[in-house]
Image (cartoon, coloured by chain):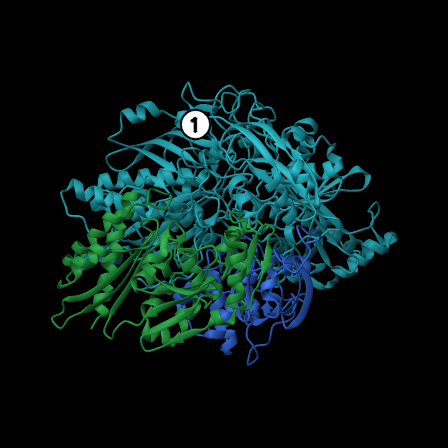
Chain colours: A blue, B green, C cyan
Amino acid sequence: MTLQQTRDDSTTRRRISVTINGREAAGEVDTRLTLADWLRDELDLVSVHLGCEHGVCGCCTVLLNGQSVRACLLLAVQVDGQSVETVESLSSNPQELHPIQEAFHEEHGLQCGFCTPAMVLRTKEILEEKLDRTNEEVRHEISGILCRCTGYQNIVNSVQCAARKLRGDAPSQHGDGIAPAAEVGAFEGQGGEDPAPAPIGTGDDLTSHPRSENEEARA
Amino acid sequence: MKPPPFAYYDPTSVDEAVSLRAEHEFDSLILAGGQSLVPMLNIRLARPEVLIDINRIEDLQTVRVTDTHVEFGATVRQHHLEVDPVVREKLPLLPEMARYIGHVENRHRGTIGGSLAHADSAAELPTAAITMDAEMVIAGPNGVRVEAAQDFFAGWMSTTVDGDELLVAVRFPVPRAGTGYGFVEVARRDGDFALAAAAAQLTLDESGRIASAAIGVASITDRPVRAGAVERQLVGMLPTRASVREAAAAIVEEVTASDDMHATHAYRRHLAAVVTARAVTAAVARAS
Amino acid sequence: MTTTTTPDSTPNSAGDRSGTESVPAPEGSRHRYLGRSMKRVEDPRLLVGRGGYIADTKMAGLTHAAIYRSPVAHGRIVSIDATEALKIPGVIAVVTGEDCKAHMNPCMNFGPATIAQYPLAVDKVRYAGEAVAAVIAESRYIAEDGVDALVVEIEALPPLVDPFKALEDDAPILHEEHGTNLAYERTFVFGEVEDTFAGADLVIEDRLHWGRSAGMPLETTGAIARPGLNGVLEIHCNSMNFSYFVFLIATALKLPSNRVTMHPVPAGGSFGSKFTAHKVPTLAGFLALQVQRPVSYVEDRQDHLMNSDHHASDRYYDARLAVKGDGTLLGLDIDVVDDYGAFLQFGVGTHGNALSQGVGPYRMQNLRYHLRAVLTNKCQQGAYRGFGSEVQNWVLERLIDQAAARLGMAPEEIRRKNFIQKDQFPYKIPGGNLYDSGDYDAVLDKALGMVDLDHWRAEQKRLREEEDRYIGIGLVTTQERSVFSSTEFWYWFDEPAFPITSSPESATITIDPSGEFQVLLHSQAMWGNSPETVAAMVVAEEFGIDPAKVNIRYADSAHALPGTGPGGSRFTVMVTGAIRGASRKLHKKIIDIAAHTLEVPAEDMEITNGRVQVKGAPEVGQELAEVAATAYFFALNLPEGMTSGLEEQYTYDHPLTSLPSADRSDLGIFYPIMGHNCHIAVMEVDPDTGQVSFLDYAAVHDAGTIVNPITLGGHVTGGTAQGVGTALLEELAYDEAGQFKSATFLDYLIPTANEVPAMKMGHVETPSPFTEYGIKGGGEGGRMATPGVISAAIDDALREYGMQVRQLPIKPSDIVQTVLAAKAANGGAATT
């Protein structure tokens, strides 16, 4: 914040140094500044979305020392010396998505995108704990983040798709029968028989979506 | 929704924190996990002159385990209760209960001491504390005092912690082997505050009768309460579906919560008996 | 006309959440891209957190506004003392309703002029949370400090919370100029209602209340306004539809319309909440003019909950249904009081939506509709997914379920008996609206194929008898009207002030000199839907090119052609019409250039696979890039009279609308592109706690020709989740003093992943004969049906206790108290 409110000492303004997405970030902050506002306004990490600012919606979720927390309920000074990850730690380049981001793209796990960075980070956290989960478990694990668009079904599918990608599963069961045969698998899979996805912007961001069954039917 | 101005202190020792408390008393608020306080700051329902952040006090982050007790420092995160094998073995009611505290993102940051000191009548940890006869360890200018959980909760979101004091730990006695436990909560959504919740710990004698019973109920009056009348009826009883239900019905006399947008008084009366009976039933099933 | 194309669900076992929901391209489809699930163009930027939302927008010298909101429901503003606030370093200005009154016109308003509203309350406050003053400061933190420092004196007046009390003679008046709290009243009678009811074998009668909820996107509404060059006020805003109404914002700000430019900003969800949201951009614009600096006003969650542009329908019904002994539906009689809150900003358009499908999918030609719109001390109403038609669906399905129960008919049986048959389309309903096409039996059949009702009915009996468990089955068949015509804004009035008949959408397609495609859309259309993906797919379809090669942009209002924006499930239909129109014009120019170059007759040429060529002799032709080079750089090679460039625009008007009759005995055609759906829910109810859960859920929708199955499916699941919220959780509540009780997300309960069922999904495609490609709108999705099917399933589970859902949301206490009352009446023991 640009102006100071009452007094000018360490109780109202501090210099902090934080590891953000693996790199050191330092700055001077008002002690009342929330972590979310610091990330958004000072570091331009605008993926940390403010949906409610009272800790319910979960859109501002970041990983603090590897654990998901609400960035609107932390003061920036509190994370001095600690490590914070935002979705940009997976990929900040729309043309080179992380496999979890790819999974959300393929499974239509987002509509407006406002909860998406939080959902992607939470997916990373739960899949690092355990890759094999029932849909029921996935629903419970993501229930701390509200999504108003999707009805969650395609987010569950995205999490399971991401798990398959991270396990290195062959993409076989995913896709017969929708797209013209020549295009099936055009973007699917992480090596192996199927070609890796072409970079977005060179013809792939609107590839046909080869899926014929709902993920939730398989679990 | 941005926090109001305050002076921020982050002491690194209990002594330092207590002397800040002594200096500022009720003009100060303690910031632990922040899952309840920071929303209140953001909404500006809380406007402290001074905010004392106790997260840098390493002493408060320790868990001390003895044969008879487990003592949690005030800023041990609630998530610890879900994942720690020692807690699971010695105090199995706590992991059973912990998953009902908000969502995991809240529990990663939210603290055991913070929830107890916040003293919401609908919250899980205070209910567990009174059920399990926990002891509160409170530091003040004259040293440390210990208070029974049942005496600690003084009314609507208030405790006996004085303006110059700080809750530093909570000590849970380890129940004797064979103690059964149950926790049942009904909320509008998973993760919401309880419309009513009940925690139970009980033991059976050799004949299968209830030898001892401790039952705490949340969200029915201004603070979590022990269901004394229910406990008295249960002790000596051979638990059946009908007998448990009949005993649990005694809780309705304790229900004072008035109608709100989520539950009517009449519904809460009914629900209090339902969750009490179900928690007791679960505990009986686990007792040996 | 009907094709059913969906792979059906895998059967699932009891309690197992499973489903299937994807759709293959129609077999033998004429389309190359339409009907195929395509990954969205919009996603990559969103996945890395670069959605470009209003709060992400940075600007040099930007200031921030925070709002002082009325602490009381009703009162007279006595004084606002800003002395202390202005002393705070960083506070720039305090703006009040007095400033608005002095320098503004009232906000845009489709209701009576005697119910005027400003973005900050003038003279009176009319609901708890209404904006009273704005503090502008160097940061939002300091602006809120300034709000805290304001000293506001308000003389409290008696609050009006109950709309029926507001209609009593001695009720205090909200708007003295209007003279009454009855903002609007009219009765429409279509057909022979009196005789029908007099002669009916059975009349079902009930009182129902649809409680107040709202779209409640996770991103609030926000705007940044900046006084720009040449006296032009620039407003960046995530409101939808502004190319339709920017001139009205200019009017409110007392600026010529060419001195206000609105810039489209993607929205993080809308669901109606940002449909025609005008107060936030109007206020930001006014504040910027006051301080002559850029001002950001982004609602925080409390602002949005208490004082968003609109809450949604809050209706009390006395409803009657006339039925023959054999289950034939004869007539419907609706008497509705709608609690509109303190203002009537959009008139009673939400009831036009109800009338557009007033008799549902059923052959019923007698309808009476008596509407009273009432003013109370609550936030004003507006749009939420369904725009009031979903409420009518719920009421009608509630009554039909009662009729079926009384006649001993199964819910699917009574519905099927009364369906409009597929050879009866286009079908004119009482009131005048037309249904374009449909095959309701096919939709029902498909849904019945996905949920084994025989199995569940047997389980219901067995679980009740053997395990003391209560499960219930609900089934509804409802309409999803799409593509509104603007006649519904005014046909309510005999002498409307502005009887508008246009609701167009436009598109501009540019093939640049390299042969690359640019599409310009002319309204702010991105709220989480897929306008860019749809546009890219349609352009690709028209030119036979790779959709990934199409770049999509949005016009600001200074550059925009006529456009209306998303709302009422119109955008996909309308933008497709616009793109197809522009494509046809572009085709002609391309062919004319190529024919001239190749010296072949134009009528022999076609465009396919991104190439213009001679039919039957594809080797004779040109790539589009070659044609583009000619068009831009070789004017002397162009046909006589043709000008340079390769860009065409097209404005697509509503495909089928007609004027109402002068006496309003016929309201005309105003919402004819008619989708349909069937939802089936199997639920378990715990009669001791009132908790409910889903055991099975299926949704089959018919949105005509499907553009992109996976995104249409997303609307169905998303709308269903919102329907779950409306039915079970969400409530914008006021207490008896008019205090707002839902001011945080701890009390306004949006469903989490735990509360929303795993769904099976299917689609039927009955193309519209009136739209390009036969597309119908499908954006409002599951919310059209879900409240009805949940109500029905809960009733069915607790039928022995006389459960009858009459009010939404259905709370656990409603369920338990019904059960307890029934047991008490039967002398039964209380249960635990």
Q: Is residue C37 visible?
A: no
Quarter residue C449 falls in: bottom left
> In the visual, does C777 lie left or right of B223?
right
Quarter residue A45 falls in: bottom right
Q: Residues within 10 Å of mark 1 (few under 14, many from 20)?
A: some
Element assignment for label 1:
strand
Residue with the mark numbered 1: C371
Q: Position of residue C585 (x, y in %)?
A: 71, 47
Q: In the rendered view, would you say C563 is above or below B216?
A: above
Please name the amino acid that badge 1 sits on. Answer: Leu
Name the residue located 31 percent from the left edge and 26 percent from the top edge. C196
Q: Is residue A15 visible?
A: yes
Q: Nearer the viewer, residue C593 or C194?
A: C194
Seen as rendered, the residue at the extreme left is: B207
Q: Chain of mark 1?
A: C
> In the visual, does C803 lie left or right of C512?
left
Q: Position of residue C558 (x, y in %)?
A: 74, 41
Q: Nearer the viewer, residue C7 or A27?
A: A27
> In the visual, does A207 lie left or right of C477?
right
Q: Nearer the viewer, residue C38 or C307?
A: C307
Seen as rendered, the residue at the extreme bottom is: A192
Name the residue located 48 percent from the left edge and 40 percent from the top edge. C436
Q: Position of residue C762 (x, y in %)?
A: 42, 56
Q: In the rendered view, would you say C667 is above or below C631?
A: above
